[in-house]
Image (tube, grey):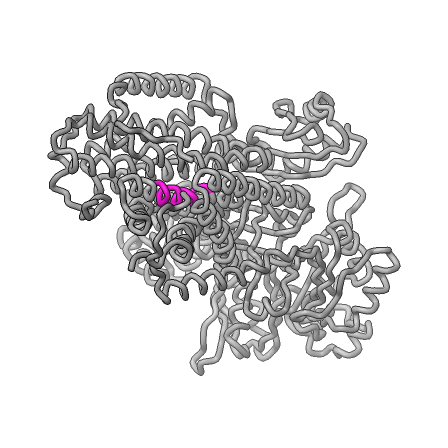
Amino acid sequence: MRLFNFTSALDFMRLKWWAIGFSTFLVVASLVSIFTKGIHLGLDFTGGTVIEVGFEQQADLDKVRDSLAKNGFPDAVVQYFGNTTEVLIRIAPREDLQTAEIGTQILEAIKQVESGEVTNRRVEVVGAAVGDELKEDGFLAVISAFIGIMLYVAARFEWRFSVGAVAALVHDVIVTMGMFSILGLEFDLTVLAALLALIGYSINDTIVVFDRIREMFRKMRDATVEESINEAITSTLSRTTMTSFTTALTLVALFFMGGALIHNFAAALIFGIAIGTYSSIYVASSITVILGASREDLMPTVIEKEGEGTPPV
Amino acid sequence: MLNQNSIWRYLLVSMVLLVSFIYALPNLYPNDPSLQINASRGAEISQDVIPSLQAELTKKNIELKSIAMDKGHILARFNNTEDQLKAREAVEALLGDKFVIALNLAPATPAWLDAIGAAPMKLGLDLRGGVHFMMEVDMKTAMDKNVNDLVQVYRVDLRTAKLRYRSVTADLVGQKVNMSFRTAEDVTAAKALLSKNDPDMEFKETADFGLQAGFSEARLKALREDAVAQNITIIRNRVNAIGVAEPLVQRQGAERIVVQLPGIQDTARAKEILGATATLEFRLVDENADVQSAVAGRVPASSQLFVDRSGRPVVLQKRVMLTGNHIVGANSGFDENGRPQVNIDLDAKGGSTISEVTKNAIGKSMATVFIEYKPTNKKDQNGKTILEKKEEVVSVATIQARLGRSFRITGLDAPGEAQNLAVLLRAGALIAPILIVEERTVGPSLGQENIDQGINAIIWGMLTVVIFMTIYYKWVGVVANLALASNVVVLIGVMSMVPGATLTLPGLAGIVLTIGMAIDANVLINERIREEISLGRSVQQAIHEGYDRAFATIADSNITTFLVALILFGVGTGPVKGFAVILAIGIITSVFTAVTVSRVMVNMIWGNGRKIDKLPI
């Protein structure tokens, strides 16, 4: 079975300005949402308390809220988690209470109004200072991942390609975060891990395309830059989409079967891989072309790569 | 001839697969909820307890899976967690305080696998259930005490040297000691004297005949190291008392300590135990008292009966010579004859006190008593846990001379003993208090749910990929599927072999992601083979070229993901680190299985220069 079987190159570059426009729109919309609506940061970054409690029958959220308010937690956010017998309670960090006491107090408050058995499934308490540090570390991790990859791509290709590749990555990360902001999904440490994994993964497709562009530059001596790039993208289209597709398949399984705690991790990766595949095809090479990449730029760097020393057919 | 497997490649692949398979095997045997019963200090545990335990559990209708003596403790296995918890209550009531009863998940690894060191993967707290604490050492309080102590020390030093000062005060904000004098000569003399006594301090002359003493960088660092190291030692001792089978107490960063207690549900009790206070006292041994009659209950009115660490009775005077809060430092070393000793430094007040009380006690024995307040299982009517005072004689030594601000205890039997004593002595001194800054508790039911859902996701992820690959690449796709299955086996095998690698919930998600990424390599290879075939190459050439040329791309793409995994490992904590480990190991194993293992199979089936017109791809 084959899904992609083209006899001639598709004219991807004809749409490059459309792609740039579309991506600019996505990035701007994401940034606007991130800066106005904000990102719903998880406990890891904000500090505070999260408690997951299991009830024997369907929980009455109002009763739980009332009891918590009476016991000094009027700011508690109470919601179902996964199903209606499990309840998630969130509380902002407190100055006046010893971090470790909060969990115990909340459980006691719930037990006051609930006749059946209440099981303490999970308690997480993170001090505000720790949250700030995790935020800082997370930011640092993303930045160092970008720098690491930029250096790697710069060493492998010419600078215009490096800029194109990293721009595509920044695009993927911003748009994925934008989606989290717009949909109000919780952004926690696992999502950050997913974002970093995404950076590592998404660059792959770009490298595959760039490798092929270089190969085409060498082979198609009479073609224009755009024609070579079209040819390269068309011939790699099958593997670019197929690899993303197989990875997305497993992640969809993870999304549906992996449970509530891993939901956002899977969501970030699925969306990120989809947007990353698009950006590898369009954003990276469009920017490279617009920056004025030419055949001569790649000629001096002779690296043993695909297509090198191919025996004649 | 193209596409022929060398004997070395066969050997490599079969060896790696076999070893991984064997070491992955223990994961198939589920862990048993169990109780691990250890004797507490001074007591012994033996086979003899087992029948009475069995009788008690049968009486309470708790089904035992097995019970046996194992590596110095009794291990009782149960069918489920509920039985395990009920059994703990029953056993605690039966055995009392002489034993430490810990909840554990005992691996049910068969003996032959155990013998070659194979063990299941370590599970993180999010999968196993338990408590995670992150504690921070309160350096501010510790430094305040240090500065205040210095003020006392300097006053005494200056007075002894007959140097008249106007004032010696503590600057707690700047963590400095400010002194002022009447003449410039006094300042110079004081500076010379004090820096000779304590070369680690930095002295600075200030206006109006002032002198300021501050801590040097090295000294600050040493103080911080000491405070953290000491807290870790104390926490370790206490964690052992809680009854946790595989506790983890680890330093993190400059001033933090991570404590992980798998299987513990009662966080309140754990917190109380970790926060218990300890003090130290020096007392004279009552040499007139008869130990035998004291044990029998006839203790002189002015004395008290104690036991030492090995349970031997000692009679001490009730009067306390000195309390441990005067100790500013204690470290172990060796005396002139190379025998282990402990050096003790006291603060100024402690120095004069001990000097006074030892004046007439030369030749007598002095005992060091370690006192700890430990929470018990009992609670008072307000629901507060009742603290139990535990006193223990940790050393008895003969006073050789009148003691001063710094003295030493010699004649210890082993360097290890000296180290222990030094730790306990320091524990008696007021150290930096600790605060809990992060707490994560996962109930055992949620842990098991996480495992089940994770495994489900892995199975469904595998299944969808396998179906897709079979449809899209036919028999060559089936080979890729086999390579993928071997990747999961090798990944689990390696994870089980690497000491310290822990499987967490994000780690399970990482396995799913690894499956998705591992198959990518085969997609790249197969796409390249198709391309080569459509260019008109023969099947043998297409396979050869496909693998050869796709390799550069595969290597490329995995290097970047590996780079990111390393960064994640560097900055991540706990569960995220678990994800990074899986990702990093998964990348290495997947390149091996997707490229080498699948190639061996492809060569076996279609290679060896066979004449094949059409590859089923």
Q: Nearer the viewer, residue A95 or B578?
A: B578
In the displayed structure, does residue A52 sit left or right of residue A274? Answer: right
x%, y% of residue B156? 44, 58
Q: Please give the name of the residue rendered at 69% of the width and 57% of the height, measured from the top-left corner.
A: B32
Q: Nearer the viewer, residue B335 or A226?
A: A226
Q: Please give the name of the residue rendered at 66% of the width and 66% of the height, measured from the top-left corner.
A: B392
In the displayed structure, does residue B251 sit left or right of residue A307? Answer: right
Q: Quadrant of residue B193?
A: bottom left
x%, y% of residue A2? 40, 34
Q: Quadrant of residue A269?
A: top left
Tell me, yes or no, if residue B298 can be seen here: yes
Q: Which residues are magenta?
A: B516-527
Q: Quadrant of residue B443?
A: top right
Q: Quadrant of the N terminus of chain B?
A: bottom left
x%, y% of residue A114? 77, 30
In the displayed structure, does residue B416 sit left or right of residue B69? Answer: left
Tell me, yes or no, if residue B347 can be seen here: no
Q: Please give the name of the residue rendered at 53% of the width and 56% of the height, measured from the top-left corner.
A: B232
Q: Nearer the viewer, residue A107 or A224?
A: A224
